[in-house]
Image: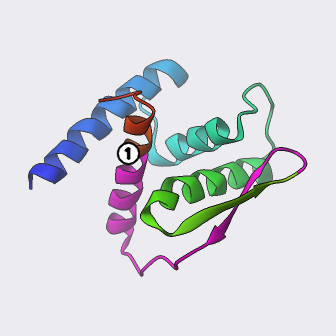
Amino acid sequence: MARDTELKDRWEILVVKLSEQFADGDPLELDAIIYLVGVQELGQYHKKYKKDDKLDLMHIAICRLLEPYGYYVFDYFDEDGWPHYTIKEELPPLKSGEQSVLMKQAIVDYFLEREFIS
């Protein structure tokens, strides 16, 4: 139970920090934070992205976020600087709520690693 409370507290702190920085304080949703991770991983911050690019950025983020859990492994950067990952292990079937918890934990871990939150 303490782990769940810790995740909840860290998630709330992270949402507030990111929302202040990127959304004028309006709370960012999970998908928006995944998108931000994708932009961070790509490193091309001042570019306008089309809808398909935004989906690709979210895919990059999901691969990067789940890489430490053993589901993906980084493969290479293409000629445009986009990272590519290979599936290492299929994700187990998860209910929607379980997917959300897994992603929140992975995002919190990502930002802890970067010392954006503590």
Residue 89 drawn in magenta? yes
User: Residue 92: image x %, image y %?
Assistant: 42, 80
In the foreground, 76 or 107:
76
Location of residue 37 by image quarter: top right
User: Residue 100: image x %, image y %?
Assistant: 38, 59
Residue 82 drawn in magenta? yes
- Looking at the rendered structure, the secondary structure element under dot 1 is helix
Magenta highlight range: 79-107
What kind of residue is marked 1? Asp
The answer to whether residue 75 is left or right of residue 72 is right
Number of residue marks: 1
Q: Quadrant of the C terminus?
A: top left
User: Residue 33: image x %, image y %?
Assistant: 51, 41
Q: Residue at x 57, y 53 (%)?
A: 64
Q: Can the viewer see residue 64?
A: yes
Q: Can the viewer see residue 25?
A: no
In the foreground, 69 or 27:
69
Q: Is residue 69 above or below residue 94?
A: above
User: Residue 103: image x %, image y %?
Assistant: 42, 56
Q: Residue at x 18, y 43 (%)?
A: 6
The answer to whether residue 116 is left or right of residue 42 is left
For mark 1, what is the residue? 109
Q: Residue at x 90, y 49 (%)?
A: 79
Q: Residue at x 9, y 50 (%)?
A: 2
Location of residue 12 by image quarter: top left
